[in-house]
Image: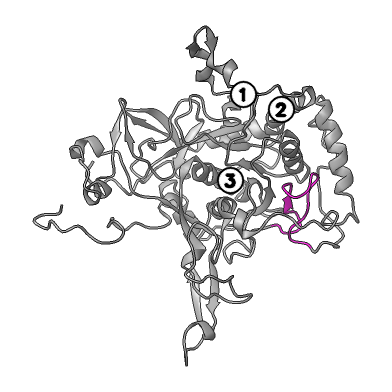
């Protein structure tokens, strides 16, 4: 209820407006980008994104995507190239084909040999006529991640036929930017099956292309790694961890899972591997974020909301740092954090304001699959026209989680590369140390955490009522 008005609003809840790029301002890069700094000379910072596929034709992503290098391991064991016709012959710029990173990993070394053969000049982009599995149906998450890292503002045209009789074409600005709009993005798409070979090949490919940053904004469902808490739960003399193992893992597959963990750490010693820390308050973070340590270049990223509080689904323990993201309600023995607006409109009891002061309704806005797919749907049932916009509401979406936070950190590190703040020869641990030097410490009653800041200051826009 608001004042004496006891009428319940119809439709969506009413919240205060907020700037779509608040997360860029919070980490101190919005002003930097607005002033237009010139990136350093030489090769652009290259970010390998191991995730779902990406809507590469999104106007804000077209200049960012390295189309020749985009690869899909979903449709083909050794990869297919979604941006090439099936009979296209490959001529790739691969600076690190002779990598020695898997030298002490026998199964991985054998896979590297197969992958190098697959990438040899003259190889066909699509194997056996099988098209890459990069349909817009699969591209929601990867498109949002790509936008947060490296989207560029765009000027696009709504064709006259979509504006009504007698109307003229209209140029529409899409003033959206990722944290590093100077970088190039290499989508490395995978599925979510528990396939260690595919993930090993994805990390090997990121190594082969000489990525400056490797981003994994998801978990890896390693069947040999259970949630740590399960092992301590006793059920009639047996620990829950052993009961959770449903089938025996074949020896080669077990070896591959073991080598994958070692490969991730080995890759991180050469280039930073940035991982989402999880959305369920996992102790120590999800795998492989929980491989992060001060001795390697794996960076585990948790989430903070727009009030500078730990997001309701995140935690501090196990995270290298927290970065901007959305929030979630909590109602348990540890904390009560409810969305007061939603509580009022849902006719549910809302605790006193002081109990809910940590909740923020601010979300992250990012790029989305245009048209009828994606998180934000188009009002049209058909696919987008080949040229020009028909509508632009579906080109952006609300996003969040530690996935969004990890993408923002990947963009932050990439920006350091693009602007020459990070030495070209810096390895993964050195980049991690640079990132930590660009963080500020924030103290809350949920613990202290590090938060990225280009300027040494932070700005949290949703502080009303605190």
Residue nearer the viewer, 257 or 327: 257
Marks counted in the figure total 3
Residue extending farthest to the left is: 4
* Residue at 78% across, 52% down: 80
- Residue hosting label 3: 416
The image position of residue 71, as x and y in percent, is 74, 51
- Which residues lie in the magenta part? 66-84
Q: Are marks 1 and 2 in contact (CB under 8 Å)?
A: yes
Q: Earlier in the sequence, mark 2 or mark 3?
A: 2
Crowding near the residue tagged with mark 2, few <14, some 14–19, many ≥20 C-alpha atoms within 10 Å:
many
- Residue 225 is labelled as 1
- Vertical order, 305 against 396 (above or below): above
- Residue hosting label 2: 257
User: Is residue 453 in view?
Assistant: no
The image position of residue 456, as x and y in percent, is 43, 41
Q: Earlier in the sequence, mark 1 or mark 2?
A: 1
């Amino acid at each position: 209820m608001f004042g004496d008005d006891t009428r319940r609003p119809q439709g969506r809840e009413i919240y205060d407006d907020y700037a779509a790029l608040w997360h860029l301002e919070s980490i101190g890069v919005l002003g930097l980008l607005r002033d237009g700094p010139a990136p350093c000379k030489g090769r652009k910072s290259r970010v390998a994104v191991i995730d779902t596929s990406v809507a590469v034709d999104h106007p804000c992503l077209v200049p960012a995507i390295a189309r020749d290098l985009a690869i899909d391991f979903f449709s083909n064991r050794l990869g297919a190239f979604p941006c090439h016709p099936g009979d296209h012959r490959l001529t790739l710029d691969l600076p690190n084909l002779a990598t020695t990173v898997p030298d002490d990993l026998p199964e991985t070394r054998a896979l590297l040999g197969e992958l190098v053969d697959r990438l040899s000049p003259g190889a066909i982009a699509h194997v056996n006529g099988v098209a890459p599995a990069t349909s817009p149906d699969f591209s929601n998450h990867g498109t949002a991640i790509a936008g947060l890292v490296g989207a560029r503002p765009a000027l696009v045209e709504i064709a006259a036929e979509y504006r009504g009789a007698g109307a003229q074409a209209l140029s529409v600005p899409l003033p959206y930017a990722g944290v590093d709009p100077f970088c190039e993005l290499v989508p490395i798409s995978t599925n979510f099956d528990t396939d260690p070979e595919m993930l090993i090949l994805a990390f090997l490919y990121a190594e082969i292309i000489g990525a400056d940053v490797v981003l994994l904004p998801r978990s890896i469902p390693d069947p040999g790694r259970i949630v740590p808490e399960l092992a301590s739960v006793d059920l009639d003399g047996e620990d829950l961890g052993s009961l959770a193992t449903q089938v025996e893992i074949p020896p080669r597959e077990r070896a591959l899972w073991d080598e994958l963990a070692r490969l991730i750490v080995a890759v991180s010693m050469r280039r930073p591997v940035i991982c989402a820390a999880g959305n369920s308050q996992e102790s120590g973070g999800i795998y492989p974020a929980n491989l992060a340590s001060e001795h390697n270049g794996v960076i585990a990223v948790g989430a903070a909301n727009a009030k500078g509080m730990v997001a309701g689904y995140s935690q501090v323990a196990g995270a290298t740092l927290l970065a901007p993201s959305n929030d979630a309600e909590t109602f348990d023995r540890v904390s009560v954090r409810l969305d007061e607006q939603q509580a009022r409109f849902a006719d549910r009891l809302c605790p006193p304001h002081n109990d809910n002061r940590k909740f923020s309704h601010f979300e992250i806005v990012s790029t989305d699959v245009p048209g009828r797919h994606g998180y934000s749907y188009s009002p049209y049932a058909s696919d987008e026209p080949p040229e020009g916009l028909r509508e632009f509401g579906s080109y952006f979406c609300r996003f969040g989680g530690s996935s969004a936070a990890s993408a923002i950190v990947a963009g932050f590190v990439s920006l350091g590369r693009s602007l020459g703040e990070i030495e070209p020869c810096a390895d993964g641990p050195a980049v991690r140390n640079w990132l930590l030097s660009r963080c500020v410490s924030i103290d809350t009653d949920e613990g202290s955490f590090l938060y990225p800041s280009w300027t040494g200051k932070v700005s949290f826009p949703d502080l009303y009522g605190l």
